[in-house]
Image: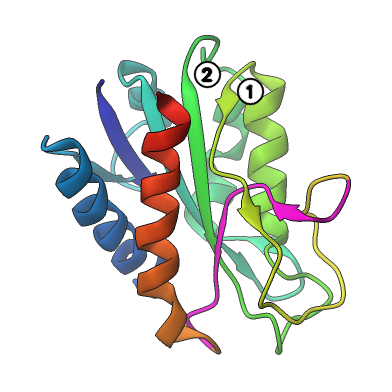
Amino acid sequence: MQIAIFYGSTTCYTEMAGEKIQGALEALTRQRIPMFNIKDISLHKCQEYELIVFGISTWDFGELQEDWESTWEDIRSLKLAGKTVAIYGLGDQYGYADWFQDALGMLHDEVVAVDADIIGYWPNEGYEFTASKALTEDKDFFVGLSLDDENQFEMSDERIKNWCAQLIEELQ
């Protein structure tokens, strides 16, 4: 299965999380997994892969990261039917508790609208926030891996490892 990671990163935290995901997936699949910064390539390149991992961070009051914001309109023209997508997001659950992981939820809704199959929903346990657009309807799960390197950095490596194992399991 061809896998690639596509991310947008202003402060490098989303990129660094992507590198950890890349390493974990490479160890599990024993294949090289490329990473692409969406500011440097066309988002349409993701259509070349069977499993697409998107990385996004939420800024300020539920806003998109700048590289995602500038390519946002391209998402609706992607041909993702028959493709599998997993999403990871970075956010600050204490500083922005009313908008925690909103960009993750917004990206999820966009890729669902272009018929992608979504995997990698992540339990809403061990987080403290007041609202999020990234929760499933029953509020039990995030629509992707939720990382908070601002307040829970020490939990990120284990979450990444477990999420990557979950992705491989869901693909089988």
- Residue 76: mark in rendering: 1
Describe residue 75's horizontal placement relative to residue 18 as left or right: right
Labels 1 & 2 near each other (Cβ < 8 A): yes
Q: Quadrant of the C terminus?
A: top left
Describe residue 145's horizontal placement relative to residue 6 as left or right: right
Give the residue type at disc 1: Arg
Q: In the rendered image, which quarter is residue 166 located in?
A: top left
Q: Give percent across and percent down for residue 88.
A: 50, 53
The answer to if 34 sits in the magenta stretch is no
Task: Kindly identify the residue that appears in the image at 84 percent across and 75 percent down.
Answer: 98
Look at the picture and state if 115 lies above or below 16. Answer: above
The answer to if 144 sits in the magenta stretch is yes
Describe residue 22's horizontal placement relative to residue 117 as left or right: left
- Asked whether 169 or 43 is in front, the reply is 169
* Secondary element at tag 1: loop
Give the residue type at disc 2: Leu
Task: Kindly identify the residue that appears in the image at 72 percent across and 36 percent down.
Answer: 109
Look at the picture and state if 117 lies above or below 136. Answer: above
Q: Give percent across and percent down for residue 44.
A: 40, 23
Mark 2, residue position: 78
- Asked whether 170 or 1 is in front, the reply is 170
Measured in 3D between alpha carbons, the distance from the residue under mark 1 to the one under mark 2, in whole angstroms, is: 6 Å
Which residues are the magenta region? 138-150
